[in-house]
Image (cartoon, grey):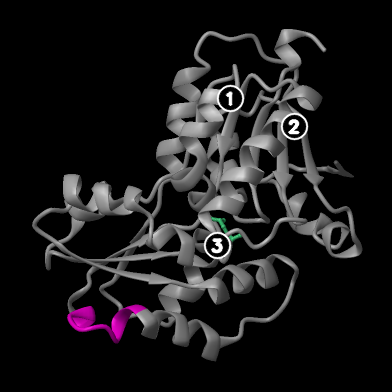
């Protein structure tokens, strides 16, 4: 493989990282991309810090040897808030992480009450405490960790109809907290959640805004790869599953959508 063919590699536990891949591809049409869904390790959000810290750097080490990426995007808040430092220390490749967009949320909030919707593992991370203290010190930051919403996003991409009661229950987990009725901006602090933005908006108060880090990560990737050589004639996209089962291959139509461009599926 020549340098110009070296891909940008995205990692998530499932389909969530597609919400980061899409804006990145929109900026870098010419890049080859490898999208890795660690479905053998899914879900990440209910695992312990120790399990994520052991799994993610080892997996990315293996993936780097196999695909020789020019840059890695950990397109997962859970993995990034727990293991970003360890991955950077272990690998000789630039690594971009995904961390909750608390800063833009605090900038946009008028009520000064913001919500953070993530996985259970993400919302309890000191990394989130630190972001809240640095960028939202004058805001009340209400958090809700939901494994159900991750599963709802997976179900949507698999072509299933929305379970509206389940969506409402997720939002109630945030809005029913003391002060929850004053939330005006919600951080989608899990990469799965922007994939169900329409469904979330449909069960939320009309004034509520949702923000996520996807566009910012895309700009960061474009910046870090400025001036590099790219394949002639547009980039290719392949999806790699750590467990190549029927459910993985059933995602083929969703992965092949133009905004994702993943036209080849394989197992690791
Ligand atoms: N998409 C992931 C995140 O951003 C994790 C989902 C999961 O596997 O629980 O946190």
Above or below 128: residue 160: below
User: What residue is shown with label 2?
Assistant: 63
Q: Tell whether 74 sits left or right of 245.
A: left
Disc 1 secondary structure class: helix
Question: What's the mark number on residue 90?
Answer: 1
Front one among 128 and 4: 128
Q: Tell whether 126 sits left or right of 163.
A: left
Looking at the image, is mark 3 or mark 2 earlier in the sequence? Answer: 3
Q: Are marks 3 and 2 in contact (CB under 8 Å)?
A: no
**Residue 202 falls inside the magenta stretch:** no
Q: Tell whether 65 sits left or right of 259.
A: right
Q: Quadrant of ligand 1?
A: bottom right
Disc 3 secondary structure class: loop
Question: What's the mark number on residue 150?
Answer: none
User: What residue is shown with label 3?
Assistant: 45
Q: Are marks 1 and 2 in contact (CB under 8 Å)?
A: no
Q: Position of residue 29 (x, y in %)?
A: 63, 29
Looking at the image, is mark 1 or mark 3 earlier in the sequence? Answer: 3
- Respond yes or no on whether mark 3 lies under 8 Å from ligand 1: yes
Front one among 54 and 155: 54
Quadrant (top left, top right, bottom left, bottom right) of the C terminus: top right
Query: Which residues make up the magenta segment?
Result: 174-181
Q: Residue at x 66, y 53 (%)?
A: 13
């Amino acid at each position: 493989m020549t340098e110009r063919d070296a891909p940008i590699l995205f990692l998530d536990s499932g389909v969530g990282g597609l919400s980061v891949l899409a804006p990145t591809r929109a900026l870098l049409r010419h890049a080859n991309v490898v999208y890795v869904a660690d479905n053998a390790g899914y879900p990440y959000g209910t695992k312990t810090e120790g399990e994520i810290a052991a799994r993610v750097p080892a997996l990315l080490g293996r993936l780097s040897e196999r695909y020789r990426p020019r840059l890695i995007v950990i397109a997962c808040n859970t993995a990034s808030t727990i293991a970003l430092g360890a991955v950077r220390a272990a690998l000789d490749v630039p690594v971009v992480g995904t961390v909750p967009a608390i800063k833009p949320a605090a900038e946009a909030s008028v009520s000064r009450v913001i919500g953070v919707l993530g996985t259970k593992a993400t919302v309890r991370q000191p990394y989130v405490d630190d972001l809240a203290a640095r960028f939202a010190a004058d805001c009340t930051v209400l958090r809700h960790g939901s494994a159900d919403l991750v599963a709802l996003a997976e179900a949507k991409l698999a072509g299933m109809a929305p379970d509206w009661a389940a969506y409402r229950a997720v939002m109630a987990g945030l809005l029913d907290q003391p002060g929850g009725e004053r939330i005006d901006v919600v951080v989608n602090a899990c990469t799965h959640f922007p994939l169900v933005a329409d469904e979330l908006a449909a069960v939320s108060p009309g004034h509520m805004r949702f923000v996520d880090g996807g566009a910012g990560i895309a700009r960061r990737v474009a910046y870090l790869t400025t001036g590099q050589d790219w394949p002639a004639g547009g980039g290719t996209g392949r999806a790699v599953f750590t467990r190549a089962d029927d459910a993985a291959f059933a995602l083929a139509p969703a992965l092949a959508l133009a905004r994702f461009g993943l036209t080849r599926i394989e197992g690791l």
